[in-house]
Amino acid sequence: MAEVLFKKVAFIGIGLIGSSMARRMAQDGMAEEFVGCARSEGTRTKAVELGLVSRAVEDPAEAVAHADLVVIATPIGSYGTIAESITLALKPGAIVTDVGSVKQSVVKAVAPHMPKDVHFVPGHPIAGTENSGPEAGFPELFDGRWTILTPSETTNDEAVDEIATLWRQMGAMVDIMTPEHHDRVLAITSHLPHLIAYTIVGTATDLEDDLRQEVMKYSASGFRDFTRIAASDPVMWRDIFLNNREATLEILQRFSEDLTAMQRAIRRSEGDALEEAFARTRAIRRGIIDAKQAE
Amino acid sequence: MAEVLFKKVAFIGIGLIGSSMARRMAQDGMAEEFVGCARSEGTRTKAVELGLVSRAVEDPAEAVAHADLVVIATPIGSYGTIAESITLALKPGAIVTDVGSVKQSVVKAVAPHMPKDVHFVPGHPIAGTENSGPEAGFPELFDGRWTILTPSETTNDEAVDEIATLWRQMGAMVDIMTPEHHDRVLAITSHLPHLIAYTIVGTATDLEDDLRQEVMKYSASGFRDFTRIAASDPVMWRDIFLNNREATLEILQRFSEDLTAMQRAIRRSEGDALEEAFARTRAIRRGIIDAKQAE
């Protein structure tokens, strides 16, 4: 058993990430009571049936009442509305955190609504699968993965420590950085890859019917891996691109230039240039394996 | 045990694919004698040490002497030279096949060098991993995967049947199509995905040093999957792009247009367009799972 960190935890949103946190915290006894909040009745019923929360409500304000920890785990487009609606219901001294994939816009949407006696510690676990919903979560999701926290300079240090401890107890490693830096790093490691995967699967979707059938049949040679990424939640990803626009467009521009250079090398049959380009990417794969983020 | 199909098999090239075939054929008793041919002495020594072949030689002509089946499994850029060098050494009635990822250029490079009494059956197993070399192979590599054969109209039917039987005994399913159609399908399912993966990992490689370190550390959220694909053999992939130039450029053009449309939607904050684009790609993933090419 891990340390009991919180008496009552409220999850606003109980999908893949929220339900994985609830599972791990319950399994290791990190909190005593779990309450959930979801807009859809199906999700609320499912969350209670699965035993993830003792109670699931529609109103965020009702969910956060008396909670020591509030975890916002919905698509980030809804953060502003949620933050506004819970302001008056938050318990003095409570900690509010989130798991959103963009941090600058999250801080902008949430921080202004936080009462002075509530501590907001923005967070982002670098973990996930292509599946969504409360049934998709599992307690080991964060094991060996990084969680990034982006507190401001004025955030209460103890609150940051408590959230860091929570993540470590859930199996994650914790890093702290600015929201700006987070958004730039994630644009490369996550947002651009997803955009590209969605695009290539979209390109295949537009093919004539016969050819599209064959693309599925013979997908094992590369394409398949892109379809896994492109099966991620559309609303979540819409919100990510709307909220990390500048950083995504910046890295996308670099990628497009590099792709054009590849295209030119193929058109001109520049074998040496292609071989050199393909050989130098192996170092990054080795680096990832050394960093224990792949096998 | 499967049926004994060939007395002597010669593998020209004994990397991931060649060694996986040798392992499976030996394990299930599909042939009696295996000879290997590799340019590098290290590969030859390794192939014999691993027990993949009883003998490994440098000269393709020496390897194919008395062989009933010759499997060309080198990067496709070397096919012309190999075909030319084995012409006079091939046994009358022998079958020559290959495993190359492009078929039109392979037929063009190999067919003119084949004696009248030798049967050339071009093939391509849609299976692989990012690893290369004789130690990377394993006998189950082809289980449940497709192998495409692209014989010409004049190819001996019995020879095509024998190669189809060989692949089925190695666990694969077999399809027959024209080289042109093969190259078009593979440009989408394999060549474009690899080009994109190489490009994005290259874009990350060009980042400032600090940022590149962080990209590796936080790679679990999408980027990692691209690095796996981009760790594939650079020479093999150089040859693929040089040999399937037109089909790759054609699908790359479509992809670039689609990516530009995505870029525009992000720049203009067109949330509905993004959500719709992200939602419609799920059908292809489901199709692949239904086709049992992913879980």
Image (spheres, coloured by chain):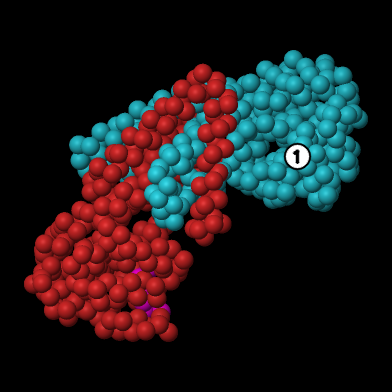
Chain colours: A cyan, B red
Residue at 44%, 56% (x, y): give it: A217
Give the letter of the chain under mark 1.
A
Residue flagged by tag 1: what amino acid is it?
Answer: Ile
Q: Residue furthest right?
A: A66
Q: Is residue A28 visible?
A: no
Q: Position of residue B205 (x, y in %)?
A: 40, 35
Q: Position of residue B87 (x, y in %)?
A: 10, 69
Boundaries of the magenta span: B20-27
Q: Is residue A107 left or right of residue A237?
A: right
Height in image: B192 above or below A94? below
Q: Is residue B167 magenta?
A: no
Residue at 37%, 46% (x, y): give it: B188
Q: Residue furthest left?
A: B88
Q: Is residue B246 left or right of residue B24?
A: left
Q: Nearer the viewer, residue A279 or B95?
A: B95
Q: Position of residue B126 (x, y in %)?
A: 38, 59
Q: Main secondary structure of the magenta part?
A: helix
Residue under numbered circle 1? A14
Q: Nearer the viewer, residue A155 or A74?
A: A74
